Image (spheres, rainbow, N blue to C red):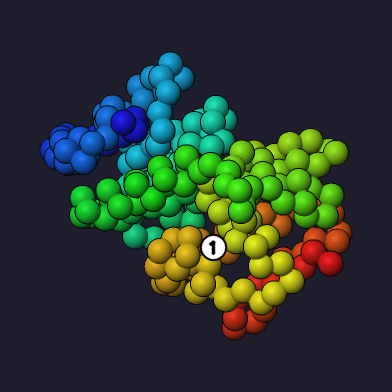
Amino acid sequence: MAKILYVEDDENLGFVTKDNLEEEGFEIVHYFDGKEAYKNFQKEKFDLCLLDVNLPELDGFSLAEKIREQNQHIPIIFLTAKTLQEDKIEGLKIGGDDYITKPFSIEELTLRIKVFLKRSTIEDSAEESGEYEIGKFHFSYPQLMLDSDEGEQKLTHREAEVLKFLCDRQNSVIKREDILTQIWGRDDYFLGRSLDVFITRIRKMLKTDDSLKIENVHGVGFRFITE
């Protein structure tokens, strides 16, 4: 049973969401403010975090930053009533993996959770180990780790998924809509902006190797140049 940290200060919404997710078989630990949630995050082990953005004591973005300092791997999904794209982009920049805008359906939320939990328990197979040698880096998708002689970099699940997608298609033109559909499950304008955030973060991770380049292909997508 997956254990989920759920932080929501709206008592009615929190109760309904918690009840429905428990009906789906998840163990839900619900807190009403970010400060209390973080205190308990440090003591307990969770498989995924659902964070409202507007929280008392410690807002969702600040809570996510603290969680990322402790754990680079755990999936973080923001639940937000904010519609400004800048707010959503900010959430992704600080380490969030996805967002759901309120009001949301339990079916959509459950689906997103299951997708992340499935990806977080990836195991090596005989056909594909998920291990890549790119330039001077060793990228381990199962371990969410990017290594070089200069040290290790821990990746979030979403960062690792995007980098893996690029690695599987090295030196080929990759359509934006293909990345969005395969990783996010849908293709829309905002997710295109989200993808740009992750591409920027991956470029920074690889910047010490001049032989690696993620090239923009205007009007189409990207090309991950490794030759």
Q: Position of residue 26 (x, y in %)?
A: 27, 35
Secondary structure under the numbered disc 1 in the rendered image: helix
Give the residue type that dot 1 points to.
Leu
Q: Nearer the viewer, residue 104 or 74?
A: 74
Position of residue 164 relative to residue 43, above or below, is below
Residue found at x 68% / y 48%: 131
Image location (x, y in percent) of residue 81: 29, 52
Locate the C terminus and report the quarter of the image it occupies.
Answer: bottom right
Categorize mark 1 by other alpha carbons within 10 Å: few (<14), some (14-19), many (20+).
Answer: many
Identify the residue at image location x=85%, y=39%. 149
Q: Position of residue 60 (x, y in %)?
A: 40, 38
Q: Which residue is mark 1?
A: 195
Q: Out of 138 and 35, give the one closest to the viewer.
A: 138
Q: Residue furthest bottom?
A: 219
User: In the image, what residue occupies the spot 40% across and 67% down?
Assistant: 186
Q: x, y (%) of residue 151?
A: 79, 35
In the rendered structure, the answer to whether residue 193 lies left or right of residue 102 reads right
Q: In the image, is 223 to the left or to the right of 64?
A: right
